[in-house]
Amino acid sequence: MLANTLYLPELREMLRDHDEIGLREFCTALHPARTADYMQGLDAAEAWQVLQHADSALRKEIFGYLDEDLKVAIIEGENREQIAELIAESAPDDRVDILEEIEPEIVNQLMQLLPQEERRDILRLSSYPEGTAGAIMTTELARLSEHLSVGDALQVLARQSEELETIYYLYVVDNENHLRGVVSARQLVSKLGKPDTRISELMESDIVVVRATDDQEEVARKVARFDLLAIPVVDDQWQLLGIITHDDVIDVVREEATEDAHLIGAVEPLDDSYLETRLMTLGWKRGLWLMILFATGALTALAMRHYHGIQEQWVWLGWFVPLIISSGGNSGSQSATLVITAMATGDITLKDWLGVVYREALIGMILGGMLAVVGFFAAWLILGRVEQAVILPITLLLVVMCGTLSGAALPLAFRRLGLDPALMSTPFVAAIIDVVGIVIYMNMALIGARYLFETP
Amino acid sequence: MLANTLYLPELREMLRDHDEIGLREFCTALHPARTADYMQGLDAAEAWQVLQHADSALRKEIFGYLDEDLKVAIIEGENREQIAELIAESAPDDRVDILEEIEPEIVNQLMQLLPQEERRDILRLSSYPEGTAGAIMTTELARLSEHLSVGDALQVLARQSEELETIYYLYVVDNENHLRGVVSARQLVSKLGKPDTRISELMESDIVVVRATDDQEEVARKVARFDLLAIPVVDDQWQLLGIITHDDVIDVVREEATEDAHLIGAVEPLDDSYLETRLMTLGWKRGLWLMILFATGALTALAMRHYHGIQEQWVWLGWFVPLIISSGGNSGSQSATLVITAMATGDITLKDWLGVVYREALIGMILGGMLAVVGFFAAWLILGRVEQAVILPITLLLVVMCGTLSGAALPLAFRRLGLDPALMSTPFVAAIIDVVGIVIYMNMALIGARYLFETP
């Protein structure tokens, strides 16, 4: 992503010259993520060769920051034993993610080479469905007995600090691994002067947890609300299964926001990044929605045909159809966007529906009124006649109100039905309003033709 | 948000009975965020009374988790001296945020009551424009000299751990406050057995920083990329000004995603949550965009008028106008959504423009082809004639291709011009395609009328 190809020639030269010292310096001098950025552009064999100059702890770190493509190429292409070692040392959550991208046959070979404990851990973690807390948790965490003292706990930490993903929360469990409390490194450090303090005295026992089967959105919501660095994952018996750390939560927040944005834009969410998604997959994920929208849109043609009488009488009616339906669609899109994002962030819940509908009705009157005024003059200008132009403002007011109301009500209805409100994409809202808009417009014209003007 | 009104009657009863023990228990038993949730629904005076039963450290924590409205009511309504004390103890970034919501006159009164140091800190922090790193940083952080030993550093930490927002990174500065390195609490703990180790030996000197003037999006990007718990903020001379912690970064990621979603939906981003935004503000933020879209949409009426000849000849042409332009608009919305979100997450940069345009051209052909097939049969059914129905598939193919291409190209062009690509909202893309779609359709009809069929 942040590929920086500045150092590539130097790196390749060092590899050619077997410059051990230079390569070791390259691996250790920078933040591992920066080292990884500079390696972007190397092929798998070159990258793997560079990584040989870092010790195993650093190697797994730099490897973790490489782009997915390069990771996959290294795992699939390099020596199985060495790769198995790398995987054994990688963070439990990360290695499960990357193994999902690898050829099943190679995964099998690698699994054979892993210590039994690691193999079990991988199988257990990969059993949780995507999008759940279990699928993003890691199993490396600091477990403590409540009978320990602060001094003991610090010793345990000092020994394990290299291996753990976070040492900033320590989880207190009983003999059956039931979660009893949590102690922060901050609390331990504040008691440095009193190393005999019992952990049980220090620990928080009102713990914020998630279940392994909870949706990852719930994880993000809790971590954000309680300002946590990590959240423990438990099963129904309150047994501690793992933790989810802040960096994974940021990824979840991003992922969910992108997914919502795609749904709002009528694209079935992608599993990979835009450029990495295969063209046929993209075609399918978009084509499906386009077809649904097209089917809904075909109703507009039927509606138009239905009112052909008045259109033949006043051909100019057709000129304003796109303007009218797009005004309704736009105001509806705005309402749907606002309501969907407000529900995603928790600003609106189903309880608020009446308030939302009331606001949107008022907003619809305000916006519809504005467009009605402008629309009247636009119609007057374009038509050159004032008497018939009055149909436009009345139609615009009604269509915009109908747009804001359905834009707000449809996502709420979807949530009520237990569906993702973002499924009510703005193009779909617009498609519905297109049909309704035409019906309103033509009926206004019919009424106008009958009462206001004499039929020509 | 998560208002839980279950405990309200009990709380009010305890207040009425002056149940000191019960109220102290209520304040201390739960996570402060939960305590705050249970207090939602109390009025400002009641809430403030409850908070008197927590010690000052806990009081500021619980207060920090209350809803903004309640915070404002408490600050504006309660005893100035006590409130000034609370503010003096609150986190520097949070208090600046909340003071912005308070009546200026009351802020002045409170500022007089604050210690000079705090007053200066507030003035300095509030001088950074919204959306910059400076505006979200906090100034409470652990500063160390590089000449200290690990043992000394742990002592410093133990003393300060109560006051600091995070103790998990310690920042090493020279005598002039220039940032020299960073040490994690993890590193300190791992050296518990060797307390004489110098900080200078332990510290990382390849530090990831942001400038105070950097955009908050840049902050979020770096924290996510480097998996940081906190990122230091420096000025141009590399002087350490503050830090931004992980919890504020999650808020930024959410805020930016919502802002982008609003822009994509053609709503000027709101400063407050949906329900808290005043109706007239909402009307203005939406009306502005609706007007722009209406003005663009008025071009469709002109285009339709321009081609009135062929429409009078074939009235049925008008029936399909909504269907055709919405198909173009929908495929364009999909492309714009994909490209905008991919740019927001960094999956696409300007360098990739050619690849993106190429993909969208191909996708346009695939999707356009699909709709053309379906469209032909739909037109045949609705028209009841096959010869004229062929105009539809050709038009649909061209319009959809035009939709995907402009949906992808317009956000890229906006980014190229240094503007936010999300400004190229999907309704705007659709409005442009509406006009182009009509022109394509009518010209196909004209060509069809001239060459394929004899004019009636």
Image (cartoon, coloured by chain):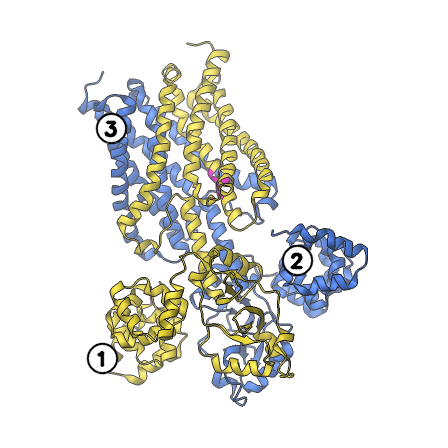
Chain colours: A blue, B yellow
Question: Bounds of the magenta span?
Answer: B333-337
Q: CA distance from mark 2 to mark 1?
A: 62 Å
Is B75 placed above or below B401 here? below
Of the 4 image quadrants, the one containing the C terminus of chain B is top left
Tell which tag, 2 or 1, sits nearer the viewer: 2
According to the picture, the residue beneath numbered tag 1 turns out to be B16
Residue B42 showing in the rendered view = no
Of the numbered discs 2 and 3, the one sitting upstream in the chain is: 2
**Residue B425 placement (x, y as % from top left):** 43, 41
Q: CA distance from mark 1 to mark 3?
A: 63 Å
Residue flagged by tag 2: what amino acid is it?
A: Ala
Height in image: A290 above or below B396? below
Q: Picture quarter containing residue A301?
A: top left
Q: Is residue A42 magenta?
A: no
Let me know if marks 1 and 3 both belong to one chain. Answer: no
Chain holding disc 2:
A
Q: Which residue is mark 3?
A: A391
- Chain under label 1? B
Residue at 58% over, 34% down:
B362
Q: Nearer the viewer, mark 2 or mark 3?
A: 2
Q: Which residue is mark 2?
A: A36
> How many C-alpha atoms fall within 10 Å of the one at disc 2: few (<14), some, or many (≥20)?
many
Is residue A132 or residue A28 the one in the foreground? A28
| Residue contact at pointers 2 and 3, CB within 8 angstroms | no
